[in-house]
């Protein structure tokens, strides 16, 4: 098992745990539960960010900039798809 495999699994695990904490946060039945899940969610988000930064720093996770025109084109396409979908639902 390589470092990248381990880091990817840590990243995935933090996403799964964060999702569980999010549900606890949303469905909290009292303030004590709410505060506990809020703190757990914040801690998990920080851990996830730290994992991402470590992967990015070591070259395991790279990002690239996208041209503004490509973003605008995709946004317009998605807006058209949403509008078309909404029209179909109203029929």
Image (spheres, rainbow, N blue to C red):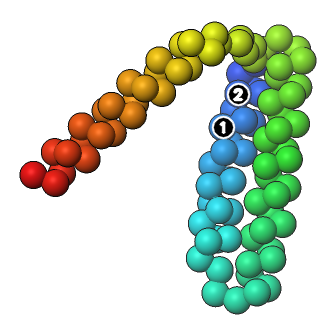
Q: In which quarter of the image is residue 37?
A: bottom right
Residue 27 in view (yes/no):
yes
Tag on residue 8? 2
Question: Percent x, y for residue 25?
Answer: 67, 71
What number is the disc on residue 55?
none
In this view, 18 is above or below 12: below
Q: At 71% from the left edge and 11% from the top edge, which residue is drawn?
A: 64
SS for dot 1:
helix
Q: Are marks 2 and 1 in contact (CB under 8 Å)?
A: yes
Q: Which residue is drawn at 65% across and 80% down?
A: 28
- Cα separation between marks 2 and 1: 6 Å
Give left or right: position of 30 versus 42: left
- Residue 1, can we see it? no
Specify few, some or many for label 2: CA neighbours under 10 Å numbering under 14, 14-19, or 20 or more.
Answer: some
What residue is rendered at 70% in x and 27% in y?
A: 8
Vertical arrangement, residue 52 with respect to residue 90, above or below: above
Query: Residue 12, labelled with which disc?
Result: 1
- Viewer-closest of 55 and 89: 89
Picture coordinates of residue 50, whole percent (x, y)? 88, 36
On the image, the x and y values in percent for residue 35 come to 81, 77
Name, please, the residue furthest toward the left: 91
Residue 40 lies left or right of residue 28; in this view the side is right
């Amino acid at each position: 098992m390589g470092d990248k495999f381990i880091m990817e699994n840590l990243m995935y695990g933090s996403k799964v745990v964060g999702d569980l904490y999010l549900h606890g946060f949303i469905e909290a039945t009292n303030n004590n539960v709410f505060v506990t899940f809020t703190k757990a969610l914040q801690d998990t988000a920080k851990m996830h960010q730290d994992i991402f930064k470590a992967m990015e720093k070591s070259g395991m996770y790279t990002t690239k900039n996208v041209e503004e025109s490509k973003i605008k084109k995709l946004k317009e396409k998605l807006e058209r798809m949403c509008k078309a979908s909404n029209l179909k639902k109203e029929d």
